[in-house]
């Protein structure tokens, strides 16, 4: 074991602060990474504040962060994919059993023995896993990804969660040219969903509660922008969508969105608000609509997404911040005031 600097939350109500954590020494199959950038996902905030207490209670101290890009500093003897000095990335998962039907299909995110990057039992240390708000991390090579060399690293980090979480459902549900697609919420996930749906050739409508994001939405790839709190604007879109991706982090009117779907249309939730939704059966039954959900994406698909971003020069629009501003960034996330992802420059941790 060795000590690494990190930022952690000590309780649901305490701000994140500088700390030291124990990391395992690299085993034969491990890659040790010096973290250069780590994105801030709204999930980090939900978890640090224990907002998902009924499903995934938080174990403190909690070191969030699952949008990790860094430089390889050590590799185990069995590691073939990476060498010291390579740029590497880690997303939301660090382990799975590799033998269950989900793992065999490349859907590790649904493995019953999945280990998430933070706040999950760590079989190596006996504690919980600690995420990317840290100077380094040690991860089995199966869960380490390659970053195309043309991508800006601060903007590439958010691809590891916001990117794959939106890329995967758009592919799974066949979004392509000729489909009318809605993206709900212009935050970290939403802005990546917008870029991907546009790149796939769909007609994309962005739903936002923030009128001041309208110009950016068009720049990011929207064909139309709807202010979701304006019932007249919403009424004009009724019954017209093939697919809607809902990336909202807080409580909102799910039935109003379901009513925008055409017959057999599908609303996929990727957002994970604290409170459950009251879904009216009538929003579904009269047009045989579906309500679905999606969780990140498998490792092979994550690499496919990164390669797609390399080819199409897609990264996240980021505001780079030092780790000392993480608590301020969380407050701004709650107010939907991020354009469109915070990416922490981890060099700042040296001064923490
Ligand atoms: P974010 O950057 O904070 O964006 C959320 C956006 O939701 C806001 O920018 C805002 O967009 C909209 N919004 C906020 N409050 C709202 C309200 N009361 N009513 C309507 N819209 C509201 O968050 P994120 O990092 O993209 O994450 C979004 C959600 O996805 C979180 O719940 C997160 O935990 C979840 N998530 C799920 C997965 C998965 O695998 N399924 C992966 C990562 C994250 P406008 O200003 O445009 O309205
Ligand atoms: Zn995330």
Image: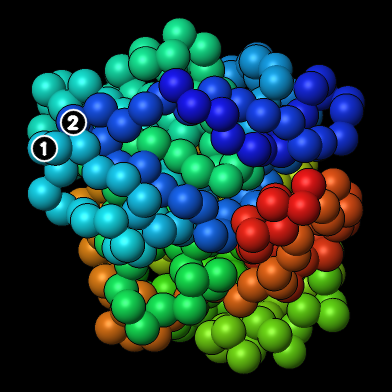
Q: Is residue 82 left or right of residue 176?
A: left
Q: Earlier in the sequence, mark 1 or mark 2?
A: 2
Q: Residue at x 44, y 14 (%)?
A: 125
Q: Does residue 122 sit above or below 154 in this rendering?
A: above
Q: Which residue is mark 1?
A: 78
Quadrant where the N terminus is found in the figure: top left
Q: Residue at x 12, y 22 (%)?
A: 99
Residue 95 visible from this viewpoint: yes
Label 2 residue SS: loop
Q: Cβ(mark 1) to ligand 2 < 8 Å?
A: no
Q: Residue at x 61, y 26 (%)?
A: 21
Asked if labels 2 and 1 touch by Cβ distance under 8 angstroms, the answer is: yes
Rendered image quadrant of residue 22: top right
Residue 39: image x %, image y %? 60, 56
Q: Which mark is residue 204?
A: none
Q: Which residue is mark 2?
A: 28
Q: Does residue 329 sit above or below 17 in this rendering?
A: below
Neighbourhood count class around disc 2 (C-alpha, 10 Å): few under 14, some 14–19, many 20 upward: few
The residue closer to the viewer here, 226 or 121, is 121
Q: Residue at x 41, y 79 (%)?
A: 151
Rendered image quadrant of residue 332: bottom right
Label 1 residue SS: loop
Neighbourhood count class around disc 1 (C-alpha, 10 Å): few under 14, some 14–19, many 20 upward: few
Residue 289 visible from this viewpoint: no
**Alpha carbon of mark 1 to alpha carbon of mark 2: how far?**
5 Å
Q: Does residue 62 sit above or below 67 in this rendering?
A: above
């Amino acid at each position: 074991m060795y000590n690494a600097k990190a930022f952690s939350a000590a309780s649901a109500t305490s701000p994140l602060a500088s700390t030291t954590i124990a990391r395992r020494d690299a085993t034969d199959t491990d890659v040790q990474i010096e973290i250069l950038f780590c994105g801030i996902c709204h999930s980090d905030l939900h978890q640090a504040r224990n907002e998902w207490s009924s499903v995934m209670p938080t174990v403190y101290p909690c070191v969030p962060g699952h949008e990790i890009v860094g430089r390889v500093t050590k590799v185990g003897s069995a590691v073939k994919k990476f060498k010291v000095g390579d740029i590497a990335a880690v997303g939301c998962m660090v382990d799975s059993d590799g033998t269950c039907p989900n793992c065999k299909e490349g859907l590790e995110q649904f493995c019953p023995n999945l280990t998430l990057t933070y706040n999950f039992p760590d079989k190596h240390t006996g504690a919980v896993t600690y995420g990317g708000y840290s100077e380094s991390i040690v991860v089995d090579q199966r869960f380490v990804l390659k970053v195309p060399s043309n991508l800006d690293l601060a903007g590439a980090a958010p691809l590891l969660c916001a990117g794959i979480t939106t890329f995967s459902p758009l592919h799974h549900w066949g979004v392509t040219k000729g489909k009318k697609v809605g993206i709900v919420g212009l935050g970290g996930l939403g802005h990546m969903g917008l870029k991907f749906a546009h790149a796939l050739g769909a007609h994309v409508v962005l739903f936002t509660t923030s009128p001041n994001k309208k110009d950016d939405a068009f720049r990011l790839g929207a064909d139309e922008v709807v202010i979701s709190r304006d019932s007249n604007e919403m009424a004009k879109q009724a019954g017209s969508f093939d697919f809607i991706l809902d990336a909202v982090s807080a409580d909102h009117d799910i039935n109003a969105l379901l009513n925008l779907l055409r017959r057999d249309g599908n609303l996929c939730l990727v957002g994970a608000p604290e409170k459950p939704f009251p879904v009216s059966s009538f929003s579904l039954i009269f047009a045989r609509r579906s309500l679905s959900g999606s969780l990140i994406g498998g490792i092979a698909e994550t690499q496919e997404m990164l390669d797609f971003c390399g080819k199409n020069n897609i990264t996240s629009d980021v505001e780079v911040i030092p780790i000392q501003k993480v608590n301020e960034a969380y407050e701004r996330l709650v107010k939907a005031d991020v354009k469109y992802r915070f990416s922490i420059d981890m060099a700042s941790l040296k001064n923490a």
